[in-house]
Every structure is written in C-alpha cells, then in structure tokens.
Image: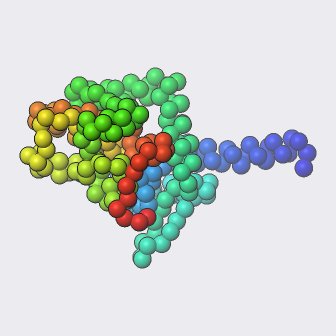
Amino acid sequence: MNKRAFKDSVYGELAKVTKAMSNPHRLEIIDLLAQGPFSVEDIANNTGMPIANASQHLQHLKAAKLVRITRNGNFMLYSLAGENVYQAWASLRELGMVYNNAVEKVVTDFRKGYGEMETVDIDTLAKLIEQNEVILLDVRPQEEYNRGHIHHAMSIPIATLEQQLKQLPKNKTFIAYCRGPFCVYADEAVALLHREGFQAKRMDGGFPDWMLKGLPITRVDKI
C-alpha cells in the first residue's frame, strides 16, 4: 500500500465514525446511552422517535462500532461501546458550545423560561459535597439512579419531586442533576424548588460528566 492509499484508507475509516455521529438524533441517543443500556423501545420513548427510526439510527451507530448489543431475556439492549464514545461526544459538545454561539443561545433562551437559574460546575460541587454544604438531588428515573449515581445523592425522580417536597428541609441548598447539560429534568426541578421557596441550583453537566472526572459514584444494580 502506498502513502496515498494508506491515508485515503485510514481517513475514510475514521470518516465512518464522524458520519455516524453527524445526525442530531444519533447524538441524542449517545447522550442517553451514557446512562446505561436501553432497549430500542425505551430509546424511542425517551427521544420521541418512532421505534423504526430509532432502530435505524442504532444500526448506523452499530455499524460504526459506537454501540454494542447485549441480550437481557427477551430484550436486546443497546449500550455505548466504551467510555471513550461519550468522551468524544462530550468533546464535540464542548466544541460546539465554545465556537458556535447559536448553541449557547438556544440553551440560554430555553432556560430563561424557567426563571433565574444558577449553575454549579462539577469541581465546585465536589468540594461542596465534601464539606457537607449542599443536598444533592438526582432527578433522573429511578432505574438510571440505580445503575449509577453520584455518591451521597438522593434519588427523587422529577415525576415525584412535587409530592416529596414536604420531606425536604428549607434551610439547605439543593443541587439538582440529571443526564447532562441538555437534559431538562434538572431545570424543571430547580424551577419547582424555587417556586416552593427552596434554595436550588443545577449542576453544570450530568452524571456521565461526573464519572469522566473519576469522582465518587455508587451503583445499586449491576449493569
């Protein structure tokens, strides 16, 4: 193989990976699968896509070796091929946030609908938790919390938060987190807590971003 053929081949193979990720639905699927394995039905439900469309996007990701399939009884579960798949997505997300002003504007404009919202970066949050200065709320579905969550976080899924407010102390600051910076569960949680007179902020990032930093986590279920 000559030099030109070598370069054409290696860049061509790498382009298959970027091509597989060059679709907004597939990026959302990668973001979701960072929480753990999901069936195609659950992926479709979480992303608002028909099952057939979700399955098609998953096949593109599988062909690029970005997802893998395991069997759980009668269900086929999809998961990321490795942690570095999420790292690649997180880097792409950060690149877009830094160099594409439209991305930040969309996020900022959306969050204005929830009122004033302060965020806390992951490194600062780790120190606040260590100093026992905040209460951390994981507002993802219970199943995702069980698969893995930030150490010391309480599980109160957004669907049940309003019913559990009476159990929460009002003399503490709450930090809500969910799947990632584009997940709206934490925004909804902070807005609800503010309306009810609580001090609340959201974590700037999600559970997978916390894991990427090698910070303490707890698992309830075995994946």
Position of residue 54 measured from the top left corner of the image (x, y, whole percent): 45, 56
Q: Residue at x 42, y 77 (%)?
A: 73
Above or below, comparing residue 82 to residue 114 in the picture: below
- Residue 187 visible in rendering: no
User: Quarter of the image containing the C terminus?
Assistant: bottom left
Position of residue 53 measured from the top left corner of the image (x, y, whole percent): 45, 56
Question: Relative to the observer, which residue lies in front, 182 or 157?
Answer: 157
Horizontally, residue 68 falls left or right of residue 165, namely right
- Residue 63 visible in rendering: yes
Could you say which quadrant of the image residue 7 lies in? top right
How many marks the image carries: the answer is 0
Position of residue 206 measured from the top left corner of the image (x, y, whole percent): 38, 42
Position of residue 89 measured from the top left corner of the image (x, y, whole percent): 52, 42
Q: Residue at x 32, y 55 (%)?
A: 145
Residue furthest right in the image: 2
Residue furthest front in the image: 131
Q: Residue at x 39, y 24 (%)?
A: 105
Could you say which quadrant of the image residue 197 lies in? top left
Question: Relative to the observer, which residue lies in front, 134 or 191?
Answer: 134
Q: Residue at x 48, y 42 (%)?
A: 213
Residue furthest left in the image: 166
Coloring applied to the structure = rainbow
Residue furthest bottom in the image: 73
